[in-house]
Amino acid sequence: MVRKIFGRGKKDTKEEKEEEEESIEEQLGPREIEAPYTPPSPNTPIEVAPSVAEKLSVDKLPTVGAKESKSSERGGTVPYHNSLPDRLKYFSDDQSAVKGLESTDSFTLGFLAMGDRFKVEKEPMGPIKVEPGMTHEEDAFIRVSNEAVAELLSAASFKEFSDVYMHYYRNAGPGKFVKIELREDISSLNKRGFARVPILKLLIGTAR
């Protein structure tokens, strides 16, 4: 009698579990059966993700033209010259080199470079002139060695030209020198306006 009671209890419990599982399956709905994996054939095209360059717009990508425009804006270089007179002529038209020239008196500077004599002179209220030949009424006589001339012609800017000129004036040596003989004292030349013009200060050796 006891066995029958326990046996019925187990059967009832099993039936209850089956009923609960059926009710859960009804709530979840039918299960989806996954299809078996099949590898792609060799002829199937493969999709490739777009590269970073494709994601960027054309306007954001750097161009060679932009670099060239920046480099062209720098400027600052002077053209090549065959002789020191030609380079001094160029600087005589450079506003940064002749700033304050209009307030200077007349002057004459004599030069000897590469075996040639030439002069840099200015009349009152006139422009600077660079001409070949000698002068007997010079305010200063300047001799420049051949090697120093070569470096002055290689200078890429007025500042570099000034640095080379003053270097060989202050550190004159065999074969490389800039020698300046003043016919008047510095104070007299400064009163005549030399101190206000960068290129004149340079040529008489008072530039810093």
Image (tube, rainbow, N blue to C red):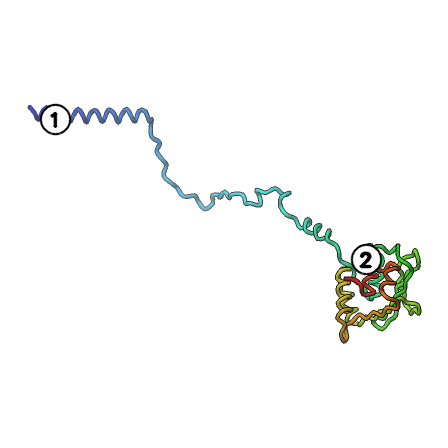
Q: Residue at x 90, y 67 (%)?
A: 138
Q: Nearer the viewer, mark 2 or mark 1?
A: 2
Rate crowding at label 1 as few (under 14), some (14 to 19) or many (20 or more) other CA atoms within 10 Å: few
**Side of 95 where 24 appears, left or right:** left
Asked whether, in this view, residue 57 is left or right of residue 123, the answer is left
Q: Based on the displayed image, in which of its 4 quarters is residue 17 positioned?
A: top left
Residue lying at the far bottom in this picture: please name it. 174
Front in this rendered view, residue 30 or 155: 155
Q: Secondary structure at mark 1?
A: helix
Q: Position of residue 142 (x, y in %)?
A: 84, 69
* Image height of 168 relative to 124, above or below: below
> What residue type is disc 2 on?
Ala
**Residue type indicated by callout 1:** Gly
Q: Nearer the viewer, residue 174 or 138?
A: 138
Quadrant position of residue 83: bottom right
The dot on residue 7 is: 1
User: Which quadrant of the view contains residue 155?
Assistant: bottom right
Image coordinates of residue 184 in percent, x first then y, are 88, 67
Numbered disc 2: secondary structure: loop
Task: From the image, tell me which residue sits under label 2.
Answer: 97
Q: Nearer the viewer, residue 133 or 80?
A: 133
